[in-house]
Amino acid sequence: MTGPLATTPCTLPLVEVCITEFDLACLSATGAVFDRLLALHPAQVVVDLSGCRHIDAAAIGLLLDVHRRLARADGVLSVRNPNPRIRRILHTARLDQILPVVESASSSPPGTPTGPEPASTPPALVAHGRASVRAPH
């Protein structure tokens, strides 16, 4: 007998993923990285597309899948720094109405102090990592 699905509490406040290639050719490997990432139960995932030149329909489908999976666990997916062409693609696909698409003027990761913090403010907890995804040729 099975009962209602219990939600697992988020264990990481923030995970950032930088993607440079995001199309059908590398979708399997990228999907595997997202599977492993989501197993960590992050509260927020930021997909940085600043180094990505192209995104296709398969990649948009993967972003929607990751968004749905995160939303079920009360997490949030956002896209950061897409180039103007990718921003138009996201707008045309109406993905910008589902996911926050943000521009960041700073190249320093979130949680990195930019000046002196008041002593009463605890430091932000941020998980940083890098995954290299290469499609088999």
Image (cartoon, helix red, strand yellow):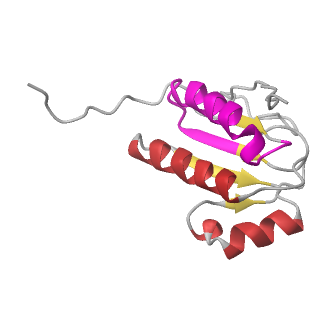
Image coordinates for residue 4, horizontal then vertical, percent: 18, 36
Q: Is residue 94 above or below residue 103?
A: below
Picture quadrant where residue 9 is located: top left
Q: Residue at x 49, y 43 (%)?
A: 70
Image coordinates for residue 18, horizontal then vertical, percent: 80, 38
Q: Residue at x 90, y 54 (%)?
A: 53
Q: Residue at x 69, y 44 (%)?
A: 46
Q: Is residue 74 above or below residue 117?
A: below
Asked whether the viewer can see residue 80, the reply is yes
Quadrant where the C terminus lies?
top right
The one of 12 and 92 positioned closer to us in this rendering: 92
Q: Residue at x 82, y 37 (%)?
A: 109
Quadrant where the N terminus lies?
top left
Seen as rendered, the residue at the extreme bottom is 92
Seen as rendered, the residue at the extreme front is 137
The one of 57 and 44 positioned closer to us in this rendering: 57
Seen as rendered, the residue at the extreme left is 1
Q: Which residues are magenta?
A: 20-46
